[in-house]
Amino acid sequence: MSHGAAHGFPVHLSDLTIEYPAHGPSPAHVAVHGLSLRIEPGEVVGLLGGSGSGKSTVADVISGDFLKARAGEVHPVITGGQATVLGYELRGLGRRASAELHFDVGHVGQDAGAVLPADRSVAEIVGEPILVRDPSYNRSALMSRVATIIDAVRLPLTVLDSYPYELSSGQRQRVAIARALVLGPALLVADEPTTGIDVTVRDSIVDLIHELQAQRTFSALIVSHDLSVLERLVDRVAVLDRGRLVALGTLDEVFSDPIHPYVVRLADELAEAGLELSAAE
Ligand SMILES: Nc1ncnc2c1ncn2[C@@H]1O[C@H](COP(=O)(O)OP(=O)(O)OP(=O)(O)O)[C@@H](O)[C@H]1O
């Protein structure tokens, strides 16, 4: 309805409340309380918070993934405030608009590399979003587009005919990133994109996202506690504690003089892991 980027922010959350409805013996649970956050065009925001603080819920909502119907799964529901992504108002978004939104958002979900479909080749997995958008897409144009993105994520073209089980976990993660980027999204939402990946591969994945982001100038929300991700990729960080936003700003602004007790703890953990904010000046 409001599609058309009237406000100019790729992501604009205003006093957003997100709830998991009651199901079976579980009562309804409010996972995010009154979150306001804007992501500017071309900006990368890092999302931090403890386990259960609501990070994946926010990533699911912003990516539009929560709108996809999946049997037997409980979806979060927006029960207060507003979420506008790429000009689409997510609350009450219709089926057609939600399909359009999916074409413009690249989503690398939690453990994306580990959950690639086992019975499809890399070429099929990466090419699928193109065919979902346009089932009659020319096959040779499809293959060349898939090969280009596979090359961009620095995988050899020989992986195109491979199946996920034949790849290393770092390679699988790159395949998931390639799939998320193949349609040239305006927004990338990545949930812990480097978790469980070997340090050397991790750095190359960070470099890769950095390079692609610089070239394509998409905006991004990246859930991560990984220092190399935060230091090298994000412009600002947002910190959630039990579903509430407790800090928002550059790494330096948030961690050099923290006030909120959770942010103080996080600052200590990050300092132990080697974050030297004064060195960033
Ligand atoms: N399907 C669900 N039904 C009910 N509650 C849920 C569901 N999924 C998540 N929650 C609850 O919502 C809150 C936020 O969960 P979420 O997965 O967003 O946190 P997170 O910050 O991503 O945690 P982690 O770092 O452990 O992945 C938690 O309290 C969680 O128990």
Image (cartoon, rainbow, N blue to C red):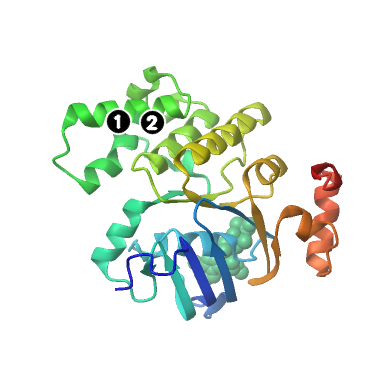
Residue nearest the observer in this picture, 25 or 13: 13
Residue nearest the observer in this picture, 170 or 105: 105
Q: Disc 1 beta carbon < 8 A from ligand 1?
A: no
Above or below residue 103? Residue 163 is: above
The answer to whether residue 109 of the structure is visible from this angle is: no
Which mark is on residue 145?
Answer: 1
Above or below residue 11? Residue 138 is: above
Q: Callout 2 environment at 10 Å: few (<14), some (14 to 19), or many (20+)? A: many
Q: Disc 2 beta carbon < 8 A from ligand 1?
A: no
Q: Position of residue 67 (x, y in %)?
A: 36, 65
**On-image quarter of the C terminus:** top right
Whether residues under marks 1 and 2 lie with C-beta atoms below 8 angstroms apart, the answer is: yes
The image quadrant of residue 237 is bottom right
Q: Residue at x 40, y 28 (%)?
A: 150
Above or below residue 225? Residue 30 is: below
Q: Position of residue 168 (x, y in %)?
A: 52, 26
- Compared across the picture, whether 234 is left or right of 4 comes to right
User: How many numbered circles are shown?
Assistant: 2
Amino acid on which the number 1 mark rests in the picture: Arg
Circle 2 residue: 149
Q: Residue at x 38, y 17 (%)?
A: 158
Q: Quote the CA–CA distance across marks 1 and 2.
A: 6 Å
- Compared across the picture, whether 118 is left or right of 221 comes to left
Q: Residue at x 72, y 43 (%)?
A: 227
Q: Secondary structure at mark 2?
A: helix
Q: Position of residue 251 (x, y in %)?
A: 74, 53
Q: Callout 1 environment at 10 Å: few (<14), some (14 to 19), or many (20+)? A: some
